[in-house]
Amino acid sequence: MSQPSTTTSAGPEQGAELAAARAAYEQLRTRGLSLDLTRGKPSPEQLDLSDALLTILQPGDVRAADGTDCRNYGGLQGLAELRAVFAGLLDVPADQLFACGNASLTVMHDVVAHAMLAVLPGAKQRWADEDEVRFLCPVPGYDRHFTICDRFGITMVPVPLTGEGPDMDVVEELVAADPRIKGMWCVPKYSNPSGESYSDETVRRLAAMPTAAPDFRLFWDNAYAVHHLTDDRTPLLPVLAACEEAGHPDRAFVFASTSKITAAGAGVAFLGSSPANMAWYARLAAAQTIGPDKVNQLRHARFFTDAAAVETHMERHRELLEPRFAAVYEVLERELGPLGIATWTRPLGGYFVSLEVPEGCASEVVRLAKEAGIALTPAGAAFPGGNDPRDSQIRLAPSFPSVDEVRSAMEGVAVCVRLAAAERAAA
Amino acid sequence: MSQPSTTTSAGPEQGAELAAARAAYEQLRTRGLSLDLTRGKPSPEQLDLSDALLTILQPGDVRAADGTDCRNYGGLQGLAELRAVFAGLLDVPADQLFACGNASLTVMHDVVAHAMLAVLPGAKQRWADEDEVRFLCPVPGYDRHFTICDRFGITMVPVPLTGEGPDMDVVEELVAADPRIKGMWCVPKYSNPSGESYSDETVRRLAAMPTAAPDFRLFWDNAYAVHHLTDDRTPLLPVLAACEEAGHPDRAFVFASTSKITAAGAGVAFLGSSPANMAWYARLAAAQTIGPDKVNQLRHARFFTDAAAVETHMERHRELLEPRFAAVYEVLERELGPLGIATWTRPLGGYFVSLEVPEGCASEVVRLAKEAGIALTPAGAAFPGGNDPRDSQIRLAPSFPSVDEVRSAMEGVAVCVRLAAAERAAA
């Protein structure tokens, strides 16, 4: 993503632009909007796509393929038939895949918590007993990953993204030198919020790089594995296989969920890793639960009988998402394209558009938008500590509102960008 | 529970009894039984009672009372209408009650994990930074509580039960003297496995006792709050109110779930505590989840519109459980009553009968039963470390098998008790 520029000398043109931008903003405020582009929430229409789940099980039809009564206790690993469906989509062998509770965020949190309080395979001690634990955080990234680090006192080390994943020269140098770096957050496909996917070369280097910490782990949050927005499905190199080939079989934990496939918060999360990591996890999970909600897993297994059914279902999500993303691009091009004061991503999948405004303007854009009734993700949220050093990145989440609402919101955002940029240029 | 005795002098009578017991056991083995009394699992008939949950929500009917679309993200505290139903049953104000995931075990584990890694209200430091953390464990108790302690390296200190809860003289002396004692497991009603309920006096003393640790907590696992087996509903003094009155408002965490009300593993768990504790928990839970499975909570809220509906539903559970417990008593009385070699509980609720056999015989009874095709909970499982110092307690779980199977299994258990006691008397 190239950097937008502001004109650097103030003059009569700037004065006219500032006056025009102020007038546009005043007009925007009179519209009394109440719109929200903050979070990557599925729209009600997307959720409707999975409403068959609500009644897919009838009384008397509660047994898994192996005869298990899904209403009763047990089955730590989750339903085999559901794991079989998602194993191929996630490139994790089914016997190394757990079907868990309702949220991959919980599984990520819990794996970090477990590593704090139990010795990981290959580790010398619990992370809670280390003087300091550090995680690499490709930026811009997912704020909830950073919240997990905050909560456990893990120091976050930002590393830049390149459009093909993290800057591997930077990553390799850091992990080779610093044994305190125990982990790295990765959203390898349609990354939140940049939209980029990791190249094969990136995945291979992550799998192969020497690390000073013997217990370094990739936290591979494959949240958007099947969430395509175009026909270009962007194959992702299977990370577990790459790690094993590179001689680091225990390097990656793979996370995913159906939150943006079926229902957000009422779906099924998955965890996959090497046999050694999964044995470690299973031992700890056995103290935490007797088993996941198998009834909900059976609903999902009946709804998705194979991987192809998931892919077909995701096409219908795409049909609902594409016009919303198109509305974002259309407004940005029309309103900001001629001004040259912003750039934005056009992701091939996922839930976000990343908007880059002139340096020092992102917070002001978000503030102006809020005053005009348009809620945006706080500026800096995609950076550890909420601190975007350039104050220039804004995450746009167009999935939830209607297409008309997205268009109205983006027209408002464009006005705010224009005003913030003009004020800055005139300052 | 009085202690059973063995005859202490071996003689011709003992020889005849041993021979008869051996013959009975050989006959038992020829029956080729395959029966299981190990775990407190609801029977399929009990689970059928809640099958309306499967189809209670239809497409288009997915909104909570406040309009929330339960299929989407959010709502950390869980559905208000479901919390309102269970608040009264659990004696926790609804605004201090969270409706969580599918298992109270997970909530208990997580509260301990959170206390290990975040400073509890009133604590000086995280428990992970203490040299040693100890929990009081009334015995016999619930093995999964002890597994949580094991997993976090918490030292378990057994304290005896009296029939009205833990021996409070012992408890008060221990917690007053030892600041390492940070917690205590309590199953205050129809305790697993002894069946006893805590008297008002016990609850008041637990709430009021001075503790050397400023961050001492009661882990109040009210698993059987509404699981009556008789008309004597055994009121339990509300622990949060008692703690507040005694000047220790933050002392108790209350846990419960619908696992043995609706579906085991597909129900809803609850956590309640003081405002300060719940604020602490909410802050930590917000890093772990965006919210619980609200769709499943809405199912439960539709199924149970008020507390009376829960009580009525539990009457139907009782109708299925009572004959199973009756079969246990009937066989034990007939087969072991005249011999005077065992005693057993007759709980007013819950899921277990606790069988006391002659000292040193429990492991042998479980071994003999296993060889005859009857699976029993391992001897000692109800004690920290699996170590019953008298080797005399056996937990019987009659809920899952049919009444006929319970009767067959108990006839077999009686034969095993008789043989183990006779062998011991003859030794």
Image: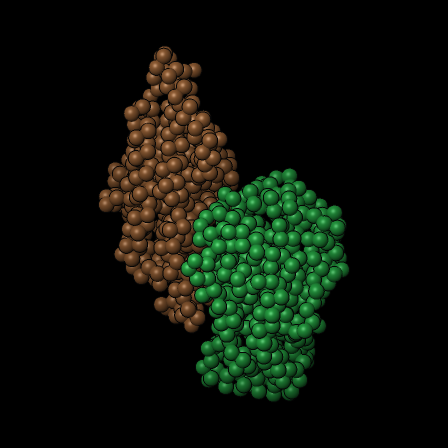
Chain colours: A brown, B green
Residue sitting at x 50%, y 58%: B298
Q: Nearer the viewer, residue A331 or A284?
A: A331
Q: Is residue B94 visible?
A: yes
Q: Can you say whether A212 is above or below A358 in the image?
A: below
Q: Quadrant of residue B382?
A: bottom right
Q: Residue at x 54, y 85 (%)?
A: B24
Using the image, determine if residue B54 lies above or below residue A20. below
Point 74% across, 61% down: residue: B200
Q: Which is nearer the eye, A339 or B55?
A: A339
Residue A236's quadrant in the figure?
Answer: top left
Q: Is residue B328 visible?
A: no
User: What x and y, as percent, mark residue A343?
Assistant: 32, 28
Q: Residue at x 52, y 44 (%)?
A: B286
Q: Is residue B345 left or right of residue A323?
A: right
Seen in the picture, residue B399 relative to A349 is either above or below; the reply is: below
| Residue B315 position (above or below residue B157) | below
Name the spot of residue A60 as percent of width and height, x first: 42, 72
Residue A2 position, x and y percent, is: 30, 26
Looking at the rendered image, the quarter that the C terminus of chain A falls into is top left
Query: How many callouts does the rendering have?
Result: 0
In depth, the one of B313 and A323 nearer the eye is: A323
